[in-house]
Image (spheres, rainbow, N blue to C red):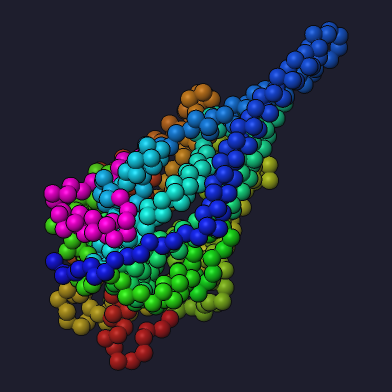
Amino acid sequence: MAPYSFAGTVESTRLSHAYRTGLVVVALAMLLLPLVYLGLIALAGAGVWWHVTRHAWWIKEGGSGLQWRLVGYAAPALAGTVVTFFMVKPVFARRPRQRPPLVLAPADHPQLFAFIEQICGHVRAPVPRVVQVDCQVNASASFTSQWQGMLRRDLVLTIGLPLVHALSVRELGGVLAHEFGHFAQGSGLRLTTVVRGINGWFSRVVNERDNWDRRLDEWSEVRDGRLLMLILPSRAAVWVSRQVLRLLMVGGHVISCFMMRQMEYDADSYEVKIAGSEAFARTMDRLRDLNLAMFHSAEYMESEFAAKRLPSDLPLFLVTWQRSRSVEVIRAADAPAGRTSGLFDTHPSDGERVAAATRAANRGVLVGGDGSATLLFRDIDAVSRNATRHHYEERGVADEVSLVDAVDSVQASVGREARQQALLSIFEFGVSRFRPLRVPEPGVEDTPAVEIQTWRFPDALERFDDRMMQRTKAFAAQEAFHAGYRGIDPALFGLPEWTLDAATAAEREAIEKTAVLASIIEPYERARMRRVTKGLDRLGGANEARYSAENLTSLVQALNATAASLEVGFDLWRISNARLILDHLSSDIRGTDPTRERRHTLSAVGRDMLARMRQTLAGVSCPVLLDAGAATTLEQACRLSAIDDPAEGLIAVQTLHTRLLLEVCWLAVRGETLDASAPATC
């Protein structure tokens, strides 16, 4: 354990009388917002009652026009009733139950719990009753329950394990002091908890949609004009009520943000008093880098999930991924560190917080503690792996993937980036996801080079992908039309009108235009493929056993086989997309025989195409250079035998094709560097 001690005491951060008064005013204003909302509910209900009783004579009197007077009487009554229901519904909305993070036992980690108690003692905050860990780049302390916990001051501390892997004992102590500093603010914290609770409730009920919302959307798709006159006013009234709720949410957010930022400054003061100003600045930099690493590694994680594998230790993966990149690269896409906080920010900007900590010029009472915070845990590797498994189980993917070593996963991501750079050095404008690429086998001469108008390629590539999407939408529109759907907004499918002729014409136009665009793209792709072939020939002639001509040829054959499989797969992609759209449009209430029949037909066709894709890959040997474990064929490499869903099978083959293409391009660039002359040209 890295030695540390506490020298001196921490003075409480005093909240000014003006600040306390302002916080009380903000809390009272926030409490008024739910009362305003309840008043609007009462007003809506009273309006319905007034209309029903005051205008009952509309339907009591006979004579002509009774049908329309009935509609005119029922529409406002129904709209008012619906909007009242939809306004009352959020009042009783409960927070969805979430699986709690992994709880730690004091007996298992005595040094961590002793450290936490020492921090609480210096900050004068209650010791948490529960300590738990998760895989987030964050730490938090909160009441065990919103009301009882607030009265009893029962706390739960959540520690994000990426912080444990990335920070020192001193820096983690500062982070904990910040969290406990909120609870040293006494009545100020209680008022802040009320404010945060109201803000969170408004945000949740504005953005969450349930079965009632979806059912109202379905009802509004009826084609009977008289029913629409009843339903559309109701839907408009619900929209208005939701906007009122949104306005209250924004108002509450604006009212509370200034006080929230001030509370963060006060909590920062405790972090500085424990860890010191310099440690505070280092911690802010590391937290910023970890959050950026989490953001920028997301694409790699998605690709790994598609390949059915994920890191077995997610916190270690994230920290190792961040350390494998330069600070400048990671921060390149971030907002300027010197920016100031805005009106809607609940936290001050990093620059403002560091500047305030620097002005304090405090060395901190925590002495030493420069070793890794992982030393506070008895077995951090086991804790991280358990938390990672818990994280995957919470998202329902634990049984779908195999877990791989975190460091190996990072090395694979670094290798993938190098391969992506190699692909872009050859195909500088990128490649189309709708055009599986084939590479001539090493040693095989291709057609002579042709003059290429490279200035036309980027625009043609982008328009080609757009037209393929248009073709897919038009195909889905035809399937929806055949399934019996009418009255759908044609703009959703990029059509001028909702007719079968319009959908057919749109698909025909897309096919014609993609053919023209392909004639522009193909010569460029062939030229780049020749460059790949030349690079592989050079690498194969270097007498390296791993990169023998036989192994390289096997790799190219595998790439070409996946390309052939994807030519079937892209038709499957259109069918799967249409099937998903029909699933979305359908429901147990509105499902009709033509709808179910069409969906079953598409599913059968999709399964047939998946079988053809399997057949294309089943007899092709898995190349040694793919490092696919025990797989002997490409069909085994992408696990098609275990996949029943056509869309999932297509994704698996696409992932394999991309992996092979990246490997081929990377090896071709390696081959170019073996020659003393300039790289191969097109």
| Residue that appears at 41% across and 51% down | 186
| Residue that appears at 48% across and 47% down | 191
Question: What range is drawn magenta here?
Answer: 98-126
Q: Any magenta on residue 108?
A: yes
| Residue that appears at 36% across and 48% down | 142
* Quadrant in the rendering for residue 330: bottom left
Q: Is residue 157 visible?
A: yes
Q: Any magenta on residue 340?
A: no
Position of 244 relative to 259 (above/below):
above
Position of 250 relative to 343 (above/below):
above
Q: Considering depth in this image, is 346 or 28 the residue closer to the camera?
A: 28
Q: Is residue 411 visible?
A: no
Q: Considering depth in this image, is 293 or 647 the residue closer to the camera?
A: 293
| Residue that appears at 86% across and 12% down | 64
Q: Looking at the figure, which quarter contains the N terminus?
A: bottom left
Position of 318 relative to 73 (above/below):
below
